[in-house]
Image (spheres, rainbow, N blue to C red):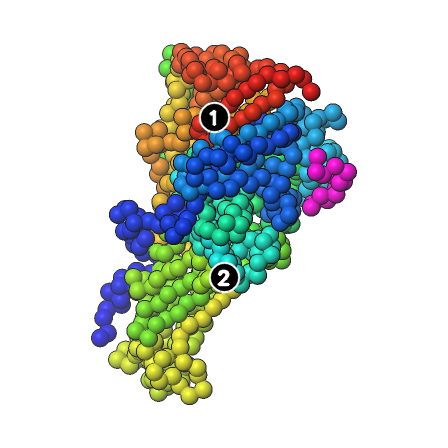
Amino acid sequence: MNAPLSDREKALMGMGEPRLRKEDARFIQGKGNYVDDIKLPGMVHMDIVRSPLAHARIKRINKEAALQVPGVLAVLTAEDLKPLKLHWMPTLAGDVAAVLADGKVHFQMQEVAVVIAEDPYAAADGVEAVEVEYEELPAVVDPFEALKPDAPVVREDLAGKTEGAHGKRYHHNHIFTWEAGDKAATDAVFAQAPVTVKQEMHYPRVHPCPLETCGSVASFDSVRGELTVWITHQAPHVVRTVVSMLSGLPESKVRIICPDIGGGFGNKVGIYPGYVCSIVASIVLGRPVKWVEDRIEHLSSTAFARHYHMTGELAATADGKILALRANVVADHGAFDACADPSKFPAGLFHICTGSYDIPTAYCRVDGVYTNKAPGGVAYRCSFRVTEAVYLIERMVDVLAQKLNIDKAEIRAKNFIRKEQFPYPQAFGFEYDSGDYHTALQKVLEAVDYKGLREEQARKRADPNCPTLMGIGLVTFTEVVGAGPTKVCDILGVGMFDSCEIRVHPTGSAIARMGTITQGQGHQTTYAQIIATELGIPSDLIQVEEGDTATAPYGLGTYGSRSTPVAGAAIAMAARKIHAKARKIAAHLLEVSEADLEWEIDRFKVKGRDDKFKTMKDIAWAAYHQPPAGLEPGLEAVHYYDPPNFTYPFGVYLCVVDIDKGTGETKIRRFYALDDCGTRINPMIIEGQIHGGLTEGFAVAMGQLLSFDKQGNIQGNSFMDYFIPTAVETPKWETDYTVTPSPHHPIGAKGVAESPPRGQHPNLHQRHPSMPLPSRRNAHQHAPYGLAGVARAQKERGSHQLTPTGAQASRACATSTSTSYNIRVHIHGSRHRQAISRGRRP
């Protein structure tokens, strides 16, 4: 049947269609399958003993009482892991990290021992029965203090090592110095520039905090020598490689399964001690071992994001044309360098910090520093430090505009890279693929009546009786995503390509297996839509599988907005291999040459003959039953895609806020977000991704913060304190788009999921150099030096007086002492019980 073109197009539900997500039906019925849902015969449970101190020597660990707890099977410490050489493990950044504390703890809530028991309750009781004697050491939590000559030594295991994974170390707490750009040329421009501006800013430590915490179920088959691990991770094949390296098991005997994952946002890229210990415990006991952390453990010990102390400088002409940029960063990495960045870029892709602007000369330097805090530095809804880079350049452009009294929209338009300059060679070596920044900016300004907003703002500023302040934020950003080209991007030496395998079945349906893993991005829907458009098979008939290394081709996973730019390209290229074979089969069936055929939505037809055609379903059947002579049966293909370049999505975001002069209450009146992600695969999913990203950006800007007192005690590590916005706090988002396809991507797509926070954070902080806004910070987050901080918070809030909870006041008072203790500690999850006996000073 030769149905109308529009009907056939609609039946495919391919690219560009806002179709509903295929995966949602089972989730809304409660039929998801997460790590904590895994139940295996004979399975036991693991829990972790964690340090209450940020820096201390471990004098003694007594397991005896714990081993007497009914149901407890084993207690493991670093001493038990040493014969296996698993007490330390490599990090993705080229450092090493303690699996279990080896004679010393480096941060509060560090893993000290694990307890394995018949059920989680016995494991928790066992944890509380483990006795640990500590000798407290001075802690250092400020990276600038950490670089002083007499600062406490965080990493004694690195004593005498002057070389790190990324070059020279000039101090015992120094990790690396990474530089990009031309320092001499940049300094010369600054020396001669008519105008220079400088701004110090702090992007504080925050946490991705996905809905599901981290966990694993490890099952070792001692008869077959095979290990299967169900795990919450964003890169299952990388886990398989790392587990093989650590355990000595052949990679062919290691199977990693990532079932449904309740959010990742970069937090589930690293390898955590709990994963390793569950695997060791399963090998030792010969039984499946489950470990799932609680929320306080998750916020306290898994990978944080940001924590950049940045100094930005711009050199410009008197009329606002930017001549050069200079940036210096001190990066707090915590106790171990566990950043999840491409190996060649210890500061990630921070050198995108020239943004959307035609800045001819630039230089940046980033120094990584050890402190007594949990390790991390992951890309929270971000592509490898791009968030920090955008924050820096957008703040600096506003500082320059303020100094020169130029409108923020005008100064941006003046400095934009022009459309005809693409592909654009950026000062740090990136090659921007495509962009049309002026069109995007103009569309936003017209949509919100920018001129009218400025007039309203001027009237209110002129009226001394106006009860509110009116702020207008404007951000234009360019992101670099799609890691990445293997010539510059790898993890542990494995290039950051990605992969797809497609099999078309005889009856015309298909299955695609990917090297990525969804954590809520809608891969089962969007990947199927790409295949539907490329092969003419309805997306409802295409199954997408990810996350099982036993069946999926090797890939580098999902993070940094690389799913569409890299895996999406692999899908298109694999589909085109099938398409080429299908053309041969169609020509055979229609008894014409391939040159006589043309493709039309879901079929090959003879040119000029609408009645002579073969659908993909016809071709699939023939591929298995009557292929042409010399052509092997079947209709399938595999493709590994190594992108020739990154992709560069961009956007323009505008925000209007009203602030009550009397109370400081801030209300977001309007937030308008325009994104350009190239070719749009599913507009509805794009909309959802942008809404989610904007909400996460709003959370960071307005309240998320992990702070520490001088002793290294983490504050705000529960949902009672850590800000997670609900529908009540979240503003209404208005979204818009332009389409500027990537010229080197097979379908022109650029990626979108990581973009919204880029434009969100600096929008709400264009006159405040640090985050979150003071009016949103919790009392304890102002109290690094005791109750004085609470008083300061009360003063800042004016009439919004805060009374600290009993726990906050107690914590503030308790941490004001510097007395040394020998401490016998029982600690588990949210039950922070301590039996403290004052001892003599060592």
Instruction: Tell me if mark 1 has few (under 14), some (14-19) or many (20+) residues whose alpha carbon lies within 10 angstroms of its own.
Output: few
The amino acid sitting under disc 1 is His
> Distance between the Cα atoms at labels 1 and 2?
41 Å
Residue 741 seen by the camera: no
Q: Which mark is residue 130?
A: none
- Residue at image x 57%, y 32%? 62
Q: Which mark is residue 832?
A: 1
Residue 795 seen by the camera: yes
Residue 210, given in percent of the width and then of the height, sits at: 42, 40
Residue 161 belongs to magenta span:
yes
Looking at the image, is mark 1 or mark 2 earlier in the sequence?
Answer: 2
Q: With respect to residue 635, does 663 lie above or below? A: above
Residue 513, given in percent of the width and then of the height, sits at: 42, 62
Residue 481, given in percent of the width and then of the height, sits at: 52, 49
The amino acid sitting under disc 2 is Val
Query: Quadrant location of the N terminus?
Result: bottom left
Residue 823, given in percent of the width and then of the height, sits at: 58, 23
Residue in the foreground of this view, choosing between 763 and 815: 815
Q: Secondary structure at mark 1?
A: loop
- Residue at image x 53%, y 45%? 277
Q: Which residue is mark 2?
A: 223
Q: Which residues are magenta?
A: 156-169
Q: Secondary structure at mark 2?
A: loop
Q: With respect to residue 774, does 354 lie above or below? A: below
- Residue at image x 42%, y 16%? 805
Tell me if label 1 and label 2 are in contact, CB under 8 Å: no
Q: With respect to residue 93, does 335 lie above or below? A: above
Residue in the foreground of this view, choosing between 808 and 498: 808
